[in-house]
């Protein structure tokens, strides 16, 4: 799959350096695989959830959340946000605020 864009991961890691390894590990798994559907994605990422049309990945032992929109038919992952667990819990990402 192709990720749009890795710069979101790097930008988050500037402020959360400990997230760099887990985020880049997630990126490598995504880029090296093809997921035809939600079931295949869930089989690889056990801690992934659906929230409406968005996909939420738990990253780094539940310390971070990566929110993405996935187009399985095009094999593209659009990163909407990368957040700390506490920022995710505030819920502002759901409205785009």
Image (spheres, rainbow, N blue to C red):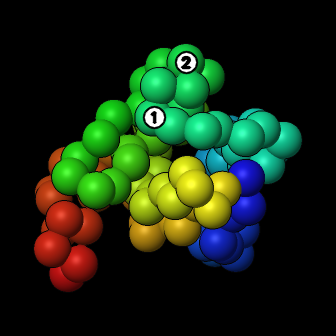
Q: Secondary structure at mark 1?
A: helix
- The dot on residue 43 is 2
47 left or right, relative to 88: right
Residue 17: quadrant of the picture: bottom right
x then y, percent, for residue 18: 65, 46
**Sequence-first tag of 2 and 1:** 1
Q: Which of 79/14 is in front? A: 79
Residue 7: quadrant of the picture: bottom right
Q: Which of 35/49 is in front? A: 35
14 left or right, relative to 83: right
Q: Quadrant of the C terminus?
A: bottom left
- The dot on residue 68 is none
**76 relative to 89, above or below:** below
Residue most toward the front? 73
x then y, percent, for residue 48: 42, 32
Q: Residue under label 1, please give it.
A: 38
**7 relative to 22, above or below:** below
Query: Image point 73% across, 61% down: which residue?
Result: 2
Q: Which of 45/86 is in front? A: 45
Query: Image point 54% across, 67% down: which residue?
Result: 78
Residue most toward the bottom? 97
Query: Image point 57% across, 56% down: which residue?
Result: 73
x then y, percent, for residue 68: 45, 58
> How many C-alpha atoms fall within 10 Å of the one at disc 2: few (<14), some, or many (≥20)?
few
Query: Image point 55% across, 18% down: which residue?
Result: 43
* Residue contact between numbered discs 2 and 1, judged by CB atoms under 8 Å: no
x then y, percent, for residue 6: 71, 68
């Amino acid at each position: 799959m192709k990720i749009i864009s890795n710069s979101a991961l790097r930008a988050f890691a500037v402020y959360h350096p400990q997230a760099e390894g887990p985020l880049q590990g997630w990126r490598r798994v995504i880029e090296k695989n093809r997921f035809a559907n939600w079931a295949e994605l869930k089989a690889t990422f056990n801690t992934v959830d659906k929230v409406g049309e968005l996909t939420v990945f738990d990253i780094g032992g539940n310390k971070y959340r990566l929110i993405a929109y996935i187009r399985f038919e095009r094999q593209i992952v659009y990163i909407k946000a990368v957040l700390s667990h506490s920022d995710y819990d505030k819920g502002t990402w759901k409205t785009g605020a």
